[in-house]
Image (cartoon, rainbow, N blue to C red):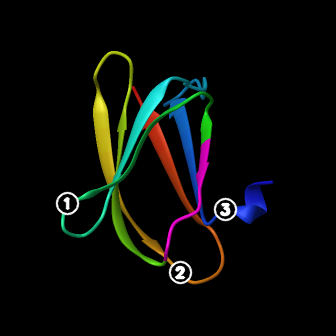
Amino acid sequence: LSNQFNLRLLFAMQGSGEYLSAVQVNILDTHGGSVMSVKSKGPWFLAQLPPGDYMVEALTIDRTSQQKKVHIEGSGQSRLDFYWR
């Protein structure tokens, strides 16, 4: 099913590679408006977004967050990997 989505996120611990679940995912447009806000149930999160630029924020249970920019093309899949220490 992964190829049916144009954004794939991965959540894991740096070093051990242990996967993380229950990560809050917030996707914002270029104006800071919320496009999506959802809790990921697994180490992978898949989404289908219109082409454009976005800011992706991933927030763990202990409230440690990371933000990354992503550009979504008209075709293909963009991937972001989030690793915590």
Q: Amino acid at mark 2?
A: Glu
Is residue 12 within the magenta segment? no
Residue at position x 63%, y 69% in the image: 77
Residue 35's spot in the image, x, y percent?
A: 36, 57
Give the camera-side residue of 52 and 80: 52
Mark 3 or mark 2, which is nearer the start of the sequence?
3
Q: Which residue is mark 3?
A: 5
Task: Count up the numbered dots.
Answer: 3
Q: Which residue is mark 2?
A: 73
What's the residue at 23%, 59% (across, down)? 33
Label 1 CA crowd tier, 10 Å (few <14, some 14–19, many 20+): few
Picture disc at residue 32:
1
Amino acid type indicated by mark 1:
Gly
Within 10 Å of the Cα at label 3, are there few (<14), some (14-19), or many (20+) other Cα atoms? Answer: some
Q: CA distance from mark 3 to mark 1?
A: 22 Å
Could you tell which of marks 3 and 1 lies nearer the N-terminus?
A: 3
Query: 13 left or right of 75?
Result: left
| Image quarter of residue 19 | top right
Relative height, residue 83 to residue 52 (above, below):
above
How far across and down, in percent of the image, does residue 85 sit?
A: 39, 25
* Relative vertical location of residue 3 with respect to residue 53 in this rendering, above or below: above
State which region is magenta. 45-50
The label nearer to you, 2 versus 1, is: 1
Tag 3 secondary structure: loop
Could you tell me the amino acid type at mark 3? Phe
User: On the picture, is 12 further left or further right than 60?
Assistant: right
| Disc 2: CA contacts within 10 A as few (<14), some (14-19) or many (>=20) | some
Identify the residue at image location x=30%, y=48%: 67
Q: Are marks 3 and 1 in contact (CB under 8 Å)?
A: no
Extreme residue toward the top, this view: 62
Q: Secondary structure at mark 2?
A: loop
